[in-house]
Image (tube, rainbow, N blue to C red):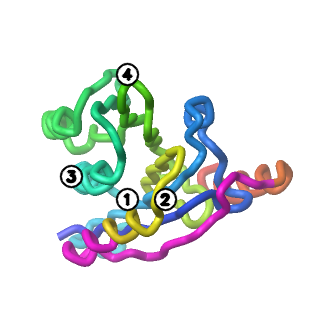
Amino acid sequence: MDSNRIGLVFGYLYNIDYMSKEAKDLGLNKRFAIVVNRYPDEAPGVYDIEFDYKFLLELLKITSVLISHDKVRIMINKGQELGSLSELNDFYADIQEDDREPFVWLKYIKKEEVTCYIEFDPYAYYGGPYPYHDAFVYSFYQKDYDRKEIQKAIISYCVNNDIFISEILLGEWKPRYSFKERVRNFFKSTKSVL
């Protein structure tokens, strides 16, 4: 059995998080992120993170109930666009496990207006700063959201499915950082890769 572990970040962490350009252009300023780590239990001492598409789909189902929408658009890594979570499931099921990667972005749309923009942050591929280091990070951008409702829904799912929640962090409602610190943090976080 493999282990999933998640963390939640509400808002923007100082000197770490910045607003997605796409989200900013859409006017979706409020952010929360789900940070997913999944490691194979059968291989003690192996620390390679694995992408678990079924777990991602479960997280999307949980959160989609809380997001007003009547349509979904999903851009996958090949530049192909899908129109539902079931299409995303079929796409992942039809390709080899080693070829599966998270989507580039997902948009929930209601009456032709984007109500939520979800972007994959690829820290799993190059390290990154705490708390995102070596994790699959999904940043959700909305005009507003109910933190308690999201937290309650995700905690309930995790408790019922024996998934460890490593932490819940509260950041600021808008990004704040110094350019100098941002550059320094980037080089610190990629030092092992370089």
> In whole angstroms, how far apart are the C-alphas of marks 1 and 2?
7 Å
State how far apart marks 3 and 2 are (Cα): 19 Å
- Alpha carbon of mark 1 to alpha carbon of mark 3: how far? 15 Å
Going from N to C along the chain, the mark reached first, 4 or 2, is: 4
Q: How many numbered marks does the figure carry?
A: 4
- Which mark sits nearer the N-terminus, 4 or 3? 3
Q: Which residue is mark 4?
A: 79
Report the span colored magenta. 155-177
- Mark identifier at residue 49: 1
Counting residues from the start of the chain, the first of labels 3 and 2 encountered is 3
SS class, disc 4? loop
Q: Report the amino acid beneath label 1.
A: Ile
Sequence-first disc among 1 and 3? 1
Dot 2: element: loop
Cα separation between marks 4 and 3: 21 Å
Is residue 134 visible from the viewing direction of this image?
yes
Which residue position holds label 3? 54
Crowd class of label 2 (few under 14; some 14 to 19; many from 20; radius 10 Å): many
State if disc 3 and disc 4 touch (CB < 8 Å). no
Query: Could you tell me which quadrant the N terminus lies in?
Result: bottom left
Other-residue count near label 4 (Cα within 10 Å), few / some / many at <14 / 14–19 / ≥20: few
Left or right: 163 as drawn, with respect to 131: left
- Of the two numbered discs 1 and 2 on the same chain, state the one appearing first in sequence: 1
Task: Give me the residue at 27% from left, 66% from top.
Answer: 40
Pick the front one: 188 or 137: 137
- Residue name at image x 28 percent, y 40 percent: 100
Residue 9 lies, in percent from the top left, at 52, 63
Question: Where residue 98 appears, x then y in whole percent?
Answer: 26, 43
**79 in relation to 126, above or below:** above
